């Protein structure tokens, strides 16, 4: 876990390529993106204008998410 943030779903839906959500961890480290405690994506920590963020490198497929619900 590199940090937490709360945002409204309408703000989450406005995120697109290049959007930045500030968090805390070392640059280049792999991270998991969780939504309501469920793995949704994987990425890596980046710095943009002296601020930390996550570059999404993989979005977990719906099939994989459903499979994990049974575990």
Image (spheres, helix red, strand yellow):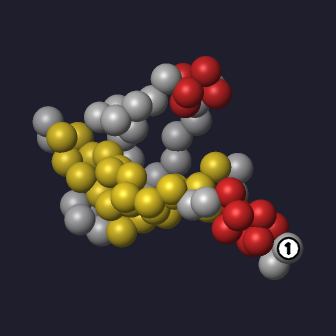
Can residue 51 be spotted in the picture? yes
Q: Considering only vertical position in the picture, is 7 above or below 38?
A: above
Residue 67 at x, y percent in the picture:
76, 71
Residue 50 at x, y percent in the picture:
15, 40
Near-viewer residue (18 or 24) = 18
- Residue name at image x 20 percent, y 48 percent: 47
Could you tell me how many numbered marks the image carries?
1
Q: Considering only vertical position in the picture, is 10 above or below 41?
A: above
Near-viewer residue (50 or 60) = 60
- Residue name at image x 70 percent, y 50 percent: 36
Residue furthest to the left in view is: 49
Can residue 1 be spotted in the picture? no
Residue furthest to the right in view is: 70
Residue 9 at x, y percent in the picture:
64, 27
Near-viewer residue (4 or 11) = 11
What secondary structure is marked by label 1? Answer: loop
Residue 42 at x, y percent in the picture:
46, 62
The image quarter containing residue 71 is bottom right
In-image side of 54 versus 14 (left or right): left
- Residue name at image x 14 percent, y 36 percent: 49
Q: Residues within 10 Å of mark 1 (few under 14, many from 20)?
A: few
- Residue name at image x 40 percent, y 31 percent: 16
Would you name the residue on which mark 1 appears? 70
């Amino acid at each position: 876990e590199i940090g937490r943030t709360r945002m409204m779903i309408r703000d989450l839906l406005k995120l697109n390529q290049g959007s930045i959500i500030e968090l805390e961890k070392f640059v280049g480290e792999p991270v998991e993106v969780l939504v309501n405690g469920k793995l949704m994506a994987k990425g890596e920590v980046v710095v943009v204008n002296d601020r930390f963020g996550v570059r999404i490198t993989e979005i977990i497929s719906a099939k994989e998410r459903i499979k994990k619900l049974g575990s």
